[in-house]
Amino acid sequence: MATGGNPMFQSKAFREQMRPAGDSTANARTAEPMSAQSLQDLYNSPSAGPAQTGRLTYNDVVSKTVLMFGALVITAVIGWQIPALMLPGVIVGLVLGLVNSFKREPSPVLIMLYAAAEGLFLGGLSQVIDALYPGAALQAVVATFSVFAVTLALYRSGKYRATPKMTRMFFIAMGAYLVFSLVNLGLMLFGVTDSMFGLRTGWLGLAIGALAVLLATYSLVLDFTQIQRGVEQGAPAKFAWTAAFGLTVTMVWLYVEILRIIAILREN
């Protein structure tokens, strides 16, 4: 009977049971062998699952994502109360976002600090926008989680999946969006435009916002795809932090874009 394929036969408990009571030759001769029933019980025992073998599971990703959102919500409350923390929050969040993106091994501490910094930024931004347009923050929260739920449902149904062609188009559109965003930020910093959102006002602002939301939904699909592949291919459990980080980055982006769209609509 071959035993190499069953993890139970590789366990320490099994090796101890199969080892003679002592190290001496005499003890080895007198040790009683395992009964046939004991061997059969070991053979019939269930194989170790992903959690027991240190592989990635969906529960790992969910639990780490909940931890990140918990930290984000707590600091968002602080940012709401002290909007001045918005600027340091966005700077620290940007730096930590880049650091975590390029790290080979996920760092739970740095990832949680990223979530905390983003919470300060989102709390301050939400308070400023909500003061100008009451109810905008709540509308943005509801819309963000609605988009997430619909995207996840479509992905699970197989109707919205990442394809090589769509992924290429996504990266091209992302490149154009980033270039425009940098130019727009430069114009705002140098006082060329005094609008809250720079060039992103009126119909142009709405069109760019709609494009950004579509890009964010596809980014969610890419996140779901990476998580599914990681689970199916038996990736190490530690990469649940990487998956949670990716989901949080996308959700933060999606929320900011929806909040901006609501502000533009309320302004007109």
Image: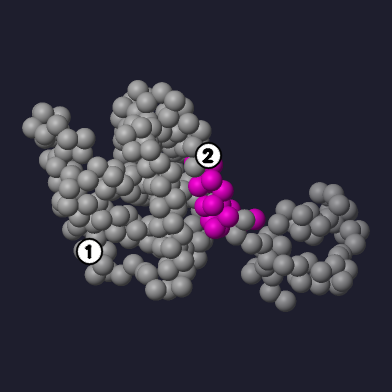
Residue type at mark 1: give it. Answer: Arg
Q: Nearer the viewer, residue 186 or 205?
A: 205
Label 1 sits on a secondary structure element that is: helix
Question: Which quarter of the image is occupied by the N terminus?
Answer: bottom right
Q: Amino acid at mark 2?
A: Gly
Q: Is residue 66 magenta?
A: yes
- Against 56, is 262 above or below? above
Contact flag, marks 2 and 1 (Cβ < 8 Å):
no
Other residues around mark 1 within 10 Å, as few (<14) / some (14–19) / many (≥20):
few
Q: Pick the residue in front: 54 or 211.
A: 211
Image: 5 above or below 218? below
In this view, the residue farthest toward the bottom is 1
Residue 125 position within the rendered picture, expressed as x and y whole percent measured from the top left:
34, 34
Q: Mark 1 — residue?
A: 168
The region drawn magenta spans 52-68
Q: State the residue at coordinates (10%, 28%).
A: 190
Residue 36 in view of the camera: yes
Which residue does the numbered mark 2 point to in the structure image?
70
**Residue 161 x, y percent position in the rendering:** 37, 69
Residue drawn at x 42%, y 73% as measured from the top left = 158
**Quadrant hosting residue 44:** bottom right
| Depth order, front residue of 241/136 | 136
